[in-house]
Amino acid sequence: MKEGVSEESNEDLIIRELSTLREKIKELKEERTRVISEIRDLKKKRGEILGRLRGLKDELNKLRETLNNLKEERSLLINERKDIIRRIRELRSRISATREVLNSSNKVSKISIQKLRSRIEQLEWRIITESLPLEEENRLVKEIMKLEAILEKALENIKLREEYKELRAELKSLIIRLNDLSNKILKLNERINNVREGIGLVKDEIGKLRNEEESLRKNIQENVNKLVSLSEELKKLSDRYAELQERLKNIRLMRRKAMEKAIMERKRRKALSKLEKGERLTLEDLKVLYGETE
């Protein structure tokens, strides 16, 4: 009697523990589903951030390439500007020297070239056509030489004035080009500053996204660790649940076998009693007795 009570008590304990285990397993499975969903959402967010990071890195590379191109273009313009400034200085020096020569020959510049040539031709004609005393002829020759020297200086002065005009025109052209280069360099500086500012903004955005991605990665890892822990706990509880189910099955099987044995024993005793009394035995009685003999 006590053994039966003990088995029933154990069965109740097992049933209660199985019920508790079912609730815990259900809760853990729900929690595992929630964690899996959380991991899926976090991975999706992380994938989106990684995609944005790739896009920003491409944009950063393009901005850096643009910056290098602008700086190279600016460097070429600066070198050209330096060369023009050097040429302007040289031209101003030549113009100044030419102006000094022209200023020193103002008197010569006022003399008419045509008059000088006409006077020389007259004097040469007199020497050729007239019979002049030697002294007069020598005087005319000296005057012709003097006039030719003045004519030569006048012609040189005209040439120098043309050269002066050309130098001034070239100087003006270089100054216009210098101003144009300066404006281009200023605009390039502005574009370079804008690109640098853009690079800074993209870098800041990349830094923020990297921090966010790192936080998500850690969060994912924490949830993965949690999932592993839940899976291990679920396995332990499931193993315990299976073990208890097996124990419960064995207890019930043993009780059923004991009950069947007790029933068979009662039937056997009844059949033996009928046999002893000489009563007619049924087929079931014979089976019980035959089974017992077996």
Image (tube, grey):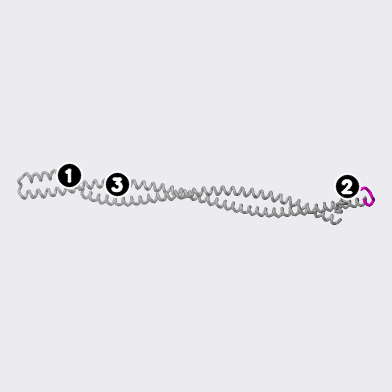
Magenta span includes 208: no
Q: Residues within 10 Å of mark 1 (few under 14, many from 20)?
A: some
Where's residue 131, x and y in %? Answer: 4, 46
Q: Earlier in the sequence, mark 2 or mark 1?
A: 1
Q: Earlier in the sequence, mark 3 or mark 1?
A: 1
Q: As rendered, which of 222 and 116 lies closer to the eye? A: 222
| Quadrant containing the N terminus in the rendered view | bottom right
Evaluate if marks 3 and 1 touch, with contact meaning CB atoms under 8 Å apart: no
Q: As rendered, which of 1 and 197 lies closer to the eye? A: 1
C-alpha separation, residue under disc 3 versus residue under disc 2: 141 Å
Look at the numbered disc 2 and give the secondary structure of its residue: helix
User: In the rendered image, which residue does mark 2 sit on?
Assistant: 283
Look at the numbered disc 1 and give the secondary structure of its residue: helix
User: In the rendered image, which residue does mark 3 sit on?
Assistant: 170
Q: As rendered, which of 157 and 290 lies closer to the eye? A: 290
Instruction: Name the front one of labels 2 and 1.
Output: 2
Where's residue 265, x and y in %? Answer: 88, 53
